[in-house]
Image: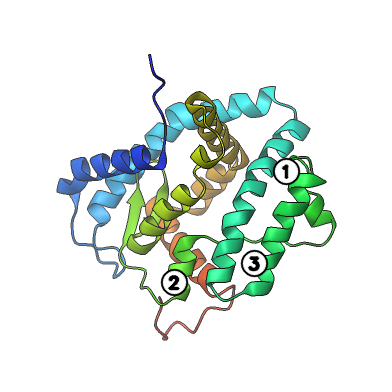
Amino acid sequence: MRSAEVSPRSLLSLCLLVLLALSGCASTSGHPDDPWEGMNRKVQTFNDNLDDYAAKPVAEVYRASVPLPTRTNVSNFFGNLEDVWIGVNNLLQGKPRDGLTDLSRFAVNSTIGIIGFFDVATELGLEKHDEDFGQTLGRWGVPSGPYLVLPLVGPSSVRDAGGFVVDKLANYPDYFIESVPMRNAGYVTKFVDTRTRLLGAESVLEDAALDKYNYLRGFYLQRRKSQIYDGRPPREDDDYR
């Protein structure tokens, strides 16, 4: 039997199916950036339930059973692979110095850092950045569009959802891993690693917010605005991309 493959295309298909199933819950919101609040709240509930009963327990087992140095090596490995696309996005945004730094990080960590398991580049003063194609579109002047909560992914926007698909295709391990089981194992390991690093954040969120949905929406919109403008967003009365 041929192994089923987890891929960006299958993830996108699942997201679309869940959104269609919940589209009847969409309603007009009082927030100008969130006209689909009814649907978004349903998707967030779906995500929260999936996290409570599956993702979070797996992450807790992973944290309890895998030593911290090994978990750090795993995080470094995936972070090293992402540096290439981060560098491309910096170049597309007209930031050649940052882009070359990202590509240099990949070169250093892939060699001296033993295929990325050790973050030697940071020790050498090569700063790690956090860029994606949604930010690139924002820098190009593409408006954010309505706030959108994606199944399995979380807070996003119409623009950033499109950028998310491009990001996943650009980082698709099909380019260097032929084995479908190995690719699937990579996807699962990266997901568990990401969720493990977020353990504890939910308790802070629950303590800080009376309405978790409103808190996440406000946090996401402000954070994306800051990211697009590299921490120097325009005044509130100026246009937001």
Q: Position of residue 236 (x, y in %)?
A: 45, 82
Instruction: Relative to 25, say whether 2 is above or below.
Output: above
Q: Position of residue 176 (x, y in %)?
A: 56, 39
Rounded to the nearest angstrom, the CA distance separating label 3 from label 2 is 17 Å
In-front residue for pair 70/104: 104
Tell me the quadrant of the picture where the N terminus can be found.
top left
Which one is closest to the eye, mark 3 or mark 2? Answer: 3
In-front residue for pair 16/48: 16
Give the labeled residue for mark 3.
99
Q: Is residue 130 visible?
A: no
Instruction: Relative to 5, say whether 239 is above or below.
Output: below
Q: Circle 2: is it few (<14), some (14-19), or many (20+) Cα within 10 Å?
A: many
Q: Which residue does the image show at 57% across and 76% down from the upper left?
A: 94
Rounded to the nearest angstrom, the CA distance separating label 2 from label 1 is 30 Å
- Element on which disc 1 rests: loop
- Element on which disc 2 rests: helix
Residue type, numbered disc 2: Gly
Q: Position of residue 121 (x, y in %)?
A: 79, 55
Q: Position of residue 109 (x, y in %)?
A: 76, 48
> Left of 94 or right of it: where is 36?
left
In-front residue for pair 101/164: 101
- Element on which disc 3 rests: helix
Residue 138 is labelled as: 2
Disc 1 or 3, which lies upstream in sequence?
3
Q: How is the image coloured?
A: rainbow
Q: Which residue does the image show at 79% across and 56% down from the upper left?
A: 122
Instruction: Relative to 96, say whether 133 is above or below.
Output: above
Disc 2 or 1, which lies upstream in sequence?
1
Instruction: Relative to 216, say whether 138 is above or below.
Output: below
Residue type, numbered disc 3: Gly
Residue type, numbered disc 1: Gly
